[in-house]
Amino acid sequence: MPELPEVENTVRDLQEAGIVGTRIVATTISWPRSVGGDADAFSLRIRGLTLAAIKRRGKFVVLQFDDDIVGLLHLRMSGRLSVEPSGSNAGTHDRVTLGFATGLELRFHDPRKFGRLLLYSVAEAEQILERLGVEPFNSAEFTLETIAHRISGRRRRIKPLLLDQRVVAGLGNIYADESLWEAGIHPARTAASLRKSEIEALVAAIPTVLGRAVAAGGTSLGAGHSNHRLPSGRSSEGWQGLHVYGRAGTVCTRCGAEIIRTVLSQRSAHYCPRCQPEARISGVLLDMDGTMVETERVLIRSFQQAAQEWGLRLADEDLLATIGKTAAASREILCGLLGTLVSFETCSKRAEQLAAEVIAQQGIARRPGLDEFLDELSRRSIPYAVATSTHRQEAEYVLAQAGIRDKFNAIVCGDEVTNGKPAPEIYHRAAAQLGLEARNCLAIEDSEPGIRAASAAGAHAILIPNLVQPTPTARVAAARVCITIAEVTELLREGAITFDA
Ligand SMILES: [Zn+2]
């Protein structure tokens, strides 16, 4: 798909093609939707106009005519322009042809038919172009100030934000990926998590990357239909300027790590996991039940057992797994199942009693991989705290039983902050006890309410689902879903998460 460098080169070629300053005398439109649907109205309006100038704004080719008319042309997926002598063979995908008095034709070739050439008054065109974001190429307005103003504090991920034409005009998938690599920023980072120095690096990277691509004539990728060719016929196939885009599985030219392809907001994204760490953080906040210790498994088994004492078989593991979560719906289902025989409260009290007995006999198991993870943090002198909505007394007991009570720099419990509910304040307070802000911390959680609360506090939240499949909303709120703690340790070792002192 043509982006700013391809459009810029298209415009440069057209400026030299001998059509500026001449009058349109003929039109051929084989696909009316390319000109807004009404081929006759379009032809009537454009015939006789003189093309005064050709410019670019974002990804738009701006055709300035006399008589207060502006044509805005967007190439979209597969559009391409060429200038040919009139009478030469028309291509099968030529949707619009403008014949000039000099005997040349401007042809809009568009196999996939998404491109548009629409006519406006000067005032209308200005209104449309004003809605576009900052112009990033050869533009005095592309500064740290203007970009910081548009992205600072926003919870959207940086890559989709860069693709939003209302923020920066002209970037598409290729150059957004390349600019993020150049600036060392992971595409999934939220804009709010970027430091000033990182925004500075990005503001420097975008014009640099675009400038290199413009100089090379743009990028031409793939075979056949996706190749972009310029009006003059020159092509940049073979340009070796891309570092990440389309290079998944090859090595990073800067550090040698393997380039990764992922999907963000339904678009592909390419990055180097070492040059573009997912998170830069200073401390770690860990949830307790389910995340570090296996108490929830014990509780669930106990719940099953308690229900059995009343002759009820609650074998549905997924359903039981929601006990202790805030899913009101599943609680209702359970109440329905238990019926009048026994209330949910009675059953869950009995389950807690049984769980306490199991814990007293067998102790509390740490989640596999926890010890290695905490060792890795200690080895790197990274402070970590417990941030849990569990009550103090219970937390102290569980942590002591699991043999990890003394490992933590701080323990913040829900009853002391939010009356036992998962809420952002817990993470704010736990981070403060480490001398940090929540947004500089990595929060590890096993449940959706915890993930939502940690994310709302601005922490980089990783979800390690316990027994329940993570819901789509939890996936969205989490920066990443890991299946085991060992995976988080691996991210650390790979440098996907880097720690600031
Ligand atoms: Zn690299």
Image (spheres, rainbow, N blue to C red):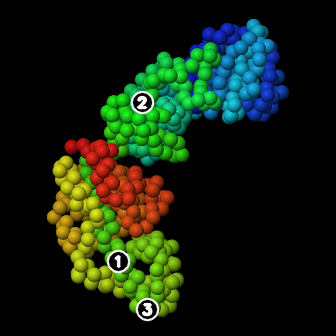
Mark 3 vs 2: CB contact within 8 A? no
Residue assigned mark 3: 310
**Mark 1 and mark 2: span between their CA atoms?**
50 Å
**Left or right of residue 461: residue 476:** right
Residue assigned mark 1: 299
* Residue situated in front as seen by the camera: 66 or 21: 21
How far from the left and from the top, in percent, is residue 437?
28, 50
Q: Is residue 248 visible?
A: yes
Structural crowding at the residue carrying mark 1, measured as other residues with C-alpha within 10 Å and reported as few (<14), some (14–19) or many (≥20): many
Which circle's residue, 1 or 3, is located before the other in the chain? 1
* Residue situated in front as seen by the camera: 148 or 209: 209
* Residue situated in front as seen by the camera: 131 or 41: 41
SS at circle 3: loop
**Mark 3 and mark 2: span between their CA atoms?**
64 Å
* Residue situated in front as seen by the camera: 63 or 19: 19
SS at circle 1: helix
SS at circle 2: loop
In front: mark 3 or mark 2? 2
**Mark 1 and mark 3: span between their CA atoms?**
17 Å
Disc 2 residue type (three-letter) = His
In front: mark 1 or mark 2? 2
The quarter in which the C terminus is drawn is top left
Structural crowding at the residue carrying mark 2, measured as other residues with C-alpha within 10 Å and reported as few (<14), some (14–19) or many (≥20): many
Residue found 67% across the figure and 8% down from its top:
18
When asked about the image quadrant of residue 321, the answer is bottom left
Residue found 46% across the figure and 72% down from its top:
318
Image vertical order of residue 280 relative to residue 388, above or below = above
Mark 1 vs 2: CB contact within 8 A? no
**Left or right of residue 390: residue 167:** right
Residue assigned mark 2: 243
